[in-house]
Image: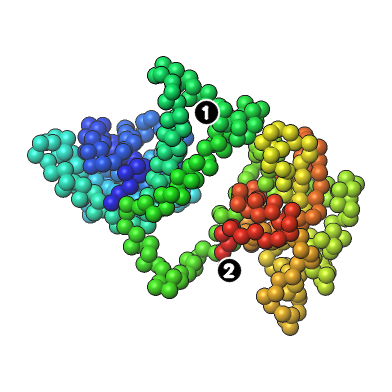
Amino acid sequence: MIPQNIKVVALDDVEDHLVKIVRGLGRAGFSVTPFFYDDNELEDIPVRLLEGIRIVFSDIHMSEGNHNHKMNGAAIANCLRKIISPGPFVIIFWSEYPKEADKVFKEVCARLEEKGHIAPIGYGAISKGEVLALSENPEEFDLNGLKEKIFEQVDKFQPLLFTAAWEEKVFRASAKTTNKLFSLTSPYDGSSKLKEWGKLTAFLGAQAVGGLNARKDIQSAVDQALLPLVEDHLSLMSGDCDVSVDAILININENGNIKRPKKISASQLHTGYLIELIEGDLNSVGSIRGVVIELAASFVNSGPFINYFGYEKNDLLKREFLNNQENLTSEEASLIKLHAVELGAECDHINDKVSTFRYLLAVLVPIELMNLFNGEGRGVGDEKGKLIFNNMSVMDAGCFSIEKNKGEGPRDFHLLISCRCFMALAIGKNASGIPRFRLRRALLEEVAHRYVTHARRPGVMRFAA
């Protein structure tokens, strides 16, 4: 079964066909966003690319009836780049010439990949005439037959439908949250419900992040207020899936074992699960709580730097991070970049009472140098697998796949955080450096726990290399 709220786009160069196709797909159970391609121009281009589109229904001959598959594929690809945000989707062609679908699909993929856009992960084909017939002869047309033809094509992509079902559950969890809170306005009559609903929404946002912060960004404030309810609703819907799960379960054997896809590394998964890469300066990232900042070269070893941390970089690495038995060469030291993780108290951030920003000292270590930090050592005779950091406060936040310099490609780094070595700056004085990424909430909570206890806190997903 196809998730009810799956996002669908319809694309055609004949306006009458587009209207009828949308009507036919609507009666088949799809909620469709139509786009008309007229005289080599796409009408009503969205202001922002549409997120979460999972199915695209498109005519094959989009280039003024031309049967050249290269021209048609290029036209479709050009439209998709202007409509949908990069993400997994399938394309279903409607045409009286289904044999052309394979050639056009390959051309669409090639053109999208050239532009750095994610190509469709598969295609299907149905008769355009059968879909149009629903609108032309609705009394005689077999609606169930149309549904079967569409479902037959879409059903081939079960892993995509499974994740689309999860997206639908998130939507329904959000809707349940809104419905539950709105029910609290029942004591008011119809004329005042809307006003009181607005007042309640503002109150919740202010309670979540503080009144002054809510005035600065009420949308983010309400997001923070509603998120706990959405998460709770979603957790109770964990087994609520209307699509087939066979294509997912087939990957897990009877003993519960499953291997990670070979071309997806653990460091790539950690990058997605544990951190969020960001661009821009500190003034553009909004809240800096949890942001990891690469300290500026002009700040490292400066007078203020030594005042905060007590030592120059090399001595600081030796005393706080580097295993006691090891020394870095000058070339190795140049590869180690000092960072700072902002860990101000959450209650202070929320209540706009920040007297200081607190930055924990951290280092981003290339994976090839980690043996000098974790106790494995340089020698081949050293004991492996027994990780011994310089002190108990040092936390390995994870191995991340990061592109440090544009054009060089991603490399693997470990982020080591000292939970006892920090600097505090007055409000308005951010750390000198460039923000590189933000720790996701679960990881930030683990760092905070380690900061006050020096003990490992469970509950964060981590992946074995």
In this rendering, would 352 be left or right of 460?
right
In front: 72, or 379? 379
* Disc marking residue 465: 2
Q: Pick whichever of labels 1 and 2 is earlier in the sequence.
A: 1
Residue 95 shows up from this direction: no
Q: Is residue 93 left or right of residue 240?
A: left
Side (left or right) of 421 relative to 292: right
Q: In the rendered image, which quarter contains the C terminus?
A: bottom right
Q: Report the front residue among 202 and 12.
A: 202
Residue 225 is situated, as x and y percent measured from the top left of the image, at 55, 36
Q: Secondary structure at mark 2?
A: loop
Q: CA distance from mark 1 to mark 2?
A: 45 Å
Which residue is at the far top? Answer: 191
Residue reaching furthest to the left:
140
Local SS, label 1: helix
Residue 220 relative to residue 166: left or right: right
Q: Is residue 382 above or below residue 363?
A: below
Above or below residue 247? Residue 187 is above
- At 32% from the left and 35% from the top, the residue drawn is 34
Q: Where is mark 1, residue-wise? A: 201
**Residue 448, x across and y down, in percent:** 70, 51
Number of marks drawn: 2
Is residue 424 in view?
A: yes
